[in-house]
Image: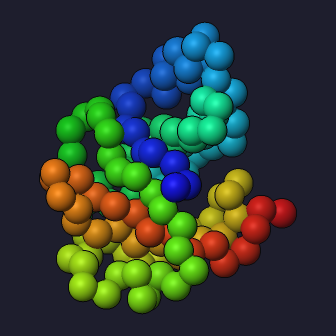
Amino acid sequence: MANLAVKVADLDAACAFYEAAGAEVRDRMHWNNGERADVFLGPIMITLFTHAIYEDAVELPAEGFLHPALFTDDLDAQLAGHTLVWGPAVVEGAFGKRRIAFVEAPGGIRLEFMEQLEDPA
């Protein structure tokens, strides 16, 4: 498991909430038509987004749980047999360079698969 993605309307308020709860907030940045930040709660990482990268492909609420993200060594093999929502595409950020894609998952959510291409600098 890489992270859990959550969409928030107010990133400042969300970061302050998690910091007050004892979390460490890192790697806040402008990213793909919005902002993002990583929240570390012990062994769990939540990535907060103000805009989901696939937001134009599916209808999303203004806030809420978006998807779990999972690492894979072979993105193409992992996507076989799934209904693709968005991607594959190469993205870059504080996390390095990754090839990602989103598929439909049970329960009306999406699942992100990520193949790490380059580690962070």
**Which residue is at the front of the view, 116 or 73?**
73
The quadrant in which the C terminus is found is bottom right
Q: Is residue 72 above or below residue 1?
A: below
Q: Quadrant of residue 16?
A: top right
In the displayed structure image, the side of residue 55 where residue 50 appears, left or right:
right
In the displayed structure image, the side of residue 80 where residue 24 appears, left or right:
right
Q: Quadrant of residue 28?
A: top right
Q: From this viewpoint, is residue 58 visible?
A: no
Q: Is residue 16 above or below residue 81?
A: above
Q: From this viewpoint, is residue 109 visible?
A: yes
Q: Position of residue 36 (x, y in %)?
A: 54, 42
Q: Is residue 41 above or below residue 76?
A: above
In the displayed structure image, the side of residue 9 where residue 83 appears, left or right:
left
Residue drawn at x 49%, y 28% is: 11
Q: Is residue 68 above or below residue 120?
A: above
Q: Position of residue 102 (x, y in %)?
A: 34, 67
Residue drawn at x 32%, y 39% is: 65
